């Protein structure tokens, strides 16, 4: 047998012998399961995704079940996974697959890319794993592998560099074994050619890696040019009635779209809007939370209201304090609710 020589041949041989083969979404051609995993894995590590993926499948075993579910239920299953637009698009995509494609995912990357929430790289991954299509992927891990292997300068998401990487990814595609090749790229970036301290000594491509030859592993890929991170702040009013807390459903789009949060604003304005009188009011310690493009300081205030208070405004619901942190709430709101619940014990 001839030893592999090309980039793709080396990667395919390595993946078959040393790559990952037992992830929950592997060893299947089911496009629903593959698509679900690919959406969850965007910006999120495998270890974090696995329990979410398993819970999703238990509640929504196929695309029809996901499409038929209320979006609030989908958001509840997603809570804590972050980047919540993914969950909204996941639901929209399932509904479109059912309505426009009879519940069957289209079989090409070009058709998949036309669906909500599916970009070029994700479409290619689903097409490769589910249908064996020869299509190139270019997620964050792959960008890092290519930047180092071929010593590509510049920030990978800069327009010219991004286009160069796509052209490179397309040029490297093998004629066959596209599944092993695609998984090999993912495995190499996730476990060997890592962002910091790459394991060059056990990399199958170390002999051809230009970054290693030039001592540039730590410098490539180049970081995003630094810019000042905007700072924002907002108030949240945790309205407590006995062992219940009042939460409000956010609009479908925007920050934390579709999730439950305490009413936002100054306590006086929130209480007046809801027609409530507070028995007591206590400012809680501010909580900082970092998003991709800004940092948010949450300024919470805990207000106790009488048991006799009644709130009938749409979008508001009383939630048992003990269960509130595990409802469909954003991660920092969950932290606040756990603090309030702990103090109430």
Image (cartoon, helix red, strand yellow):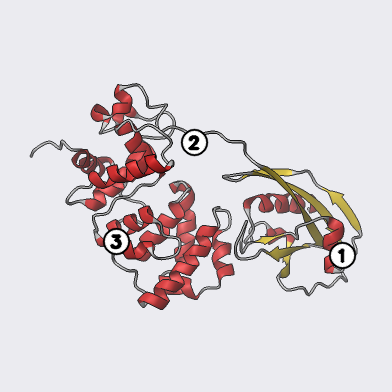
Q: Residue furthest left?
A: 1
SS for callout 3: helix
Q: Is residue 43 visible?
A: yes
Nearest to viewer (mark 3 / mark 1): 1
Q: Earlier in the sequence, mark 1 or mark 2?
A: 2
Q: Are marks 1 and 2 in contact (CB under 8 Å)?
A: no
- Looking at marks 3 and 1 on the same chain, the residue that comes earlier in the sequence is marked by 3
Distance between mark 1 and mark 2 Cα atoms: 45 Å
Q: Quadrant of residue 97?
A: bottom left
Residue at which label 1 appears = 272
Residue occupying the point 55% across, 73% down = 70
Label 3, label 1: how many angstroms apart (C-alpha)? Answer: 55 Å
Horizontal side of residue 316 vs 47, given as left or right:
right
Disc tally is 3
Residue picked out by circle 2? 224
**According to the image, label 3 marks what residue?**
130
């Amino acid at each position: 047998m001839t030893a592999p020589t090309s980039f793709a041949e080396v990667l395919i041989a390595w993946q078959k012998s040393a790559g990952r083969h037992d992830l929950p979404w592997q060893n299947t051609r089911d496009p629903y399961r593959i698509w679900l995993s690919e959406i969850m894995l965007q910006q999120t590590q495998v270890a974090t995704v696995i329990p979410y993926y398993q819970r999703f499948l238990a509640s929504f075993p196929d695309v029809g079940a996901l499409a038929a579910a209320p979006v609030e239920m989908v958001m509840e299953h997603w809570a804590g996974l972050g980047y919540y637009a993914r969950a909204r698009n996941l639901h929209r995509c399932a509904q479109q697959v059912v309505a426009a494609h009879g519940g069957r995912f289209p079989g090409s990357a070009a058709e998949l890319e036309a669906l909500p929430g599916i970009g070029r790289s994700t479409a290619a991954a689903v097409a490769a794993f589910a249908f064996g299509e020869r299509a190139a992927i270019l997620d964050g891990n792959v960008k890092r592998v290519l930047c180092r292997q071929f010593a590509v300068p510049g920030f990978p998401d800069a327009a010219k560099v991004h286009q160069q990487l796509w052209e490179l990814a397309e040029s490297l595609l093998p004629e066959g074994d596209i599944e092993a090749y695609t998984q090999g790229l993912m495995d190499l970036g996730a476990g060997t050619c890592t962002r910091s301290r790459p394991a060059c000594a056990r990399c199958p491509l170390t002999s051809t890696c230009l970054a290693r030859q030039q001592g540039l592993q730590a410098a490539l890929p180049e970081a995003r040019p630094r810019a000042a991170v905007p700072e924002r702040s907002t108030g949240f009013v945790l309205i407590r009635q006995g062992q219940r807390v009042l939460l409000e459903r956010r609009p479908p789009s925007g920050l934390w779209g579709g999730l439950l949060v305490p009413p936002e604003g100054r306590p006086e304005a929130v209480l007046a809007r809801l027609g409530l009188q507070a028995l007591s009011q206590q400012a809680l310690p501010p909580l900082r939370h970092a998003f991709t493009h800004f940092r948010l300081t949450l300024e919470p205030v805990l207000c106790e209201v009488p048991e006799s208070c009644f709130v009938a405004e749409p979008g508001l619901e009383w939630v048992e304090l003990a269960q509130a942190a595990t409802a469909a709430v954003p991660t920092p709101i969950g932290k606040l609710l756990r603090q309030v619940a702990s103090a109430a014990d």
